[in-house]
């Protein structure tokens, strides 16, 4: 198996493990969330289910488990149909919530991505996932996921986002991009050659992915904790500052009332004008100061503009304001009115009121109008511009530090605190993330950790796979080495046997080059020719041939080199000690090696016997001249 297929094998396993474990972590961690908001959840339940199904589908496609793939495909199609239908009927997820988790639903873009991926996995099992179809499908998912990721980093239409919540957007898009690559790798030419990686590589990859996903989850929780901690610090600061500021201004109005009650009469109008204007000058967020009778009619009223009394008609028309006014008038303590607005003015205001009871005078209220926008802006400052604060009176938003949609106010809170008012009531102060990019570094860090961990898991599984292959090949080579060793020993034995045979045989095995020089000679040449192999190697054989037989021998050698073998050629050689030897040759020419291979057999006794027989035949022919030789 080539390294390319090993890489594909490791990649598909690691990604499938990542999808499954991430989904399982989301399912396990979901019940532990106490306050379900966008910024308190690492991965919502709907997303966890989809990731779990996608991971199972990928593993089923890799191992070609058709029945399991069809079952998971059925579950995923149900989820996809539910998500797309509900989104189409009631709008995008942020306006409605899931029946499964009672939280934000999956976006249509991610539903489509999951459906396309699952179809590609099914095609790969049926060998219908051609390379072109795989490339187009994978590139399409990559573009969709990349667009979604950029839509969070920069401005882009919300419908393109694959995210479920503030903390999971990067990891969802990251896994979507990896999923698109797996679609390309599952093309038939790649998948047909894949094999089971073995238990140890799978366990190594699974362990690496598990540690990676757990680390990512813990870092995501740390990011959520950091955001909550920062928002809680801001809320605590604003809460205490707001309570202190309201308390101080209520005390200011109360001191004015107590001072006049101590004097026993109202001050002169000039004195009143001077004191009221000093209040407006020293406290910029106070818009007007006045004295009111029981009918909410101004006895004295000083404001920053000549339209200081334009709020009175609307104030008197509201039933809750009348009830508050009469309750405060009858009490002996300062109080804060419900929030109200001015005509054609979205700003919100409250009245700081203290009852004024003077001898021989009807009961009155000293009240000052306080701008909530002004005082909250001063209290919040610009140190926490990554957050948006909203102030609620019940369910009614009465102040926002930046623009937020009504849906954001309902679905994206981070943290909240109650501001206790003097009359026992309270306002709710809620923090939101104003700029998600402000925490993008912390979120990106967790995703980078996941990417790095998955990369290490990939290399870990690949290394274990290569180690397994190396071990298998080492065993194979070890066995092959044993077989080779046995073969070499057998060959050595056969060679030794052949050498013994050549040493003790009476025939001489030899070879000659084209010029007729000995190349190799068997040891038996010492017995036949009287020369050792070392003496003959490189020596022309014609030097041993008797001069009378040399021409005939040369002719025979030339005929041999034309390709005609010989089996009964005879000539005579001169032994080293001088006597003549009769040799019978069997020889053949190797055109490939340009070598003449020959076997020399000593037929001297045979020639002698033949000569003796010829002599006896000649003697008998002399004795019987009158009869034919064939009849003797």
Image (cartoon, grey):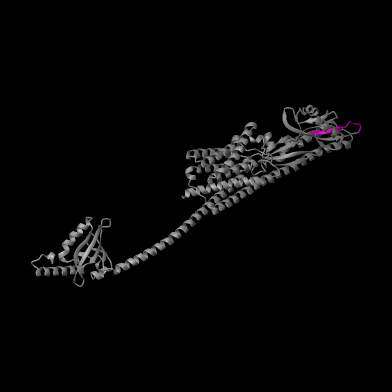
Task: Check the image and report above or below for 523 versus 71.
Answer: below
* Residue sitting nearer the eye, 415 or 355: 415
- Magenta stretch containing residue 247, yes or no? no
Residue 366 is a magenta residue:
yes
Q: Residue at x 65, y 42 (%)?
A: 45
Q: Position of residue 375 (x, y in %)?
A: 74, 37
User: Which stretch is magenta?
Assistant: 359-368
Q: Residue 491's quadrant in the figure?
A: bottom left
Number of numbered discs on residues: 0
Work out whether residue 295 or residue 286 is closer to the camera in this orientation and state it.
Answer: 295
The residue drawn where x is 31% and y is 67% is: 501
Q: Quadrant of residue 372?
A: top right
Q: Is 412 positioned to the left or the right of 4 in the image?
A: right
Extreme-left residue of the structure: 626
Is residue 45 shown to the viewer in this render?
yes
- Residue at 11% in and 70% down: 619
Left or right: residue 501 compared with residue 632: right
The x and y percentages for residue 224 are 66, 45
Q: Quadrant of residue 358?
A: top right
Q: Position of residue 345 (x, y in %)?
A: 72, 29
Given the current orientation, which residue lies at the most extreme right position?
A: 360
Q: Please, is residue 264 above or below residue 26 in the view?
A: above
User: Does the rendering let one see residue 174?
Assistant: no
Judging depth in this view, the residue of 527 and 131 nearest the camera is 527
Whole-percent x, y for residue 412 in the image = 67, 39
Is 195 or 440 nearer to us in this picture?
195
Q: Quadrant of the C terminus?
A: bottom left
Q: Is residue 190 left or right of residue 490?
A: right
């Amino acid at each position: 198996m080539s390294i390319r297929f090993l890489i594909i094998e490791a990649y598909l396993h690691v990604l499938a493990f990542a999808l499954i474990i991430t989904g399982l972590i989301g399912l396990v961690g979901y019940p532990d969330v106490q306050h379900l908001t966008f910024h308190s959840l690492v991965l919502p339940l709907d997303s966890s289910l989809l990731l779990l199904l996608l991971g199972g589908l990928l593993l089923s496609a890799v191992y070609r488990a058709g029945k399991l793939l069809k079952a998971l495909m059925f579950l995923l199609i149900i989820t996809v149909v539910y998500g797309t239908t509900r989104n189409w009927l009631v709008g995008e997820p942020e306006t409605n919530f899931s029946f499964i988790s009672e939280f934000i639903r999956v976006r249509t873009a991610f539903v489509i991505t999951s459906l396309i991926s699952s179809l590609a996995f099914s095609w790969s099992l049926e060998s219908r996932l051609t390379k072109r179809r795989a490339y187009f499908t994978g590139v399409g998912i990559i573009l969709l996921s990349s667009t979604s990721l950029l839509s969070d980093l920069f401005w882009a239409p919300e419908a393109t986002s694959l995210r479920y919540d503030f903390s999971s957007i990067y990891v969802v898009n990251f896994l979507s991009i990896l999923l698109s690559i797996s679609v390309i790798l599952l093309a038939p030419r790649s998948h047909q050659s894949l094999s089971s990686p073995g238990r140890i590589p799978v366990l190594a990859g699974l362990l690496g992915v598990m540690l990676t996903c757990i680390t990512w989850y813990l870092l995501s929780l740390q990011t959520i904790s950091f955001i909550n901690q920062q928002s809680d610090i801001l809320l605590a600061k604003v809460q205490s500052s707001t309570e202190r500021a309201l308390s101080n201004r209520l005390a200011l109005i109360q001191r004015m009332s107590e001072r006049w009650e101590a004097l026993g009469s109202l001050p002169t109008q000039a004195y009143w004008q001077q004191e009221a204007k000093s209040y407006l000058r020293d406290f910029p967020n106070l818009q007007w100061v006045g004295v009111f009778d029981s009918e909410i009619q101004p006895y004295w009223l000083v404001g920053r503009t000549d339209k200081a009394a334009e709020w009175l008609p609307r104030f008197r028309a509201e039933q809750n304001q009348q009830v508050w006014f009469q309750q405060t008038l009858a009490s002996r303590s300062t109080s804060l009115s419900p929030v109200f607005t001015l005509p054609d003015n979205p700003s919100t205001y409250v009245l700081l009121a203290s009852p004024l009871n003077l001898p021989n005078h009807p009961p009155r209220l000293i009240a000052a109008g306080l701008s909530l926008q002004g005082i909250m802006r001063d209290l919040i400052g610009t140190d926490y511009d990554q957050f948006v604060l909203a102030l609620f009176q019940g369910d009614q938003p009465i102040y926002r530090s930046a623009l937020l949609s009504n849906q954001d106010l309902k679905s994206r809170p981070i943290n909240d605190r109650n501001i206790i008012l003097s009359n026992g009531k309270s306002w709710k102060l809620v923090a939101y993330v104003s700029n998600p990019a402000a925490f993008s570094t912390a979120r990106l860090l967790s995703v980078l950790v996941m990417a790095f961990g998955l990369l290490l898991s990939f290399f870990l599984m690949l290394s274990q796979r290569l180690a397994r292959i190396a071990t298998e090949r080492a065993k194979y080579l070890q066995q092959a080495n044993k077989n080779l060793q046995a073969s070499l020993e057998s060959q050595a034995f056969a060679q030794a046997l052949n050498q013994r045979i050549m040493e003790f045989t009476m025939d001489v095995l030899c070879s000659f080059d084209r010029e007729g020089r000995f190349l190799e000679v068997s040891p038996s040449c010492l017995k036949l020719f009287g020369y050792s192999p070392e003496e003959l190697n490189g020596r022309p054989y014609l030097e041993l041939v008797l001069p009378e037989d040399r021409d005939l021998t040369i002719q025979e050698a030339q005929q041999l080199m034309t390709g005609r073998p010989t089996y009964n050629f005879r000539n005579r050689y001169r032994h080293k000690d001088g006597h003549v030897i009769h040799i019978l040759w069997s020889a053949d020419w190797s055109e490939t090696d340009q070598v003449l291979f020959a076997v020399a057999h000593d037929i001297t006794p045979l020639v002698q016997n033949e000569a003796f027989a010829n002599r006896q035949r000649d003697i008998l022919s002399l004795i019987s001249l009158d009869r034919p030789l064939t009849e003797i």
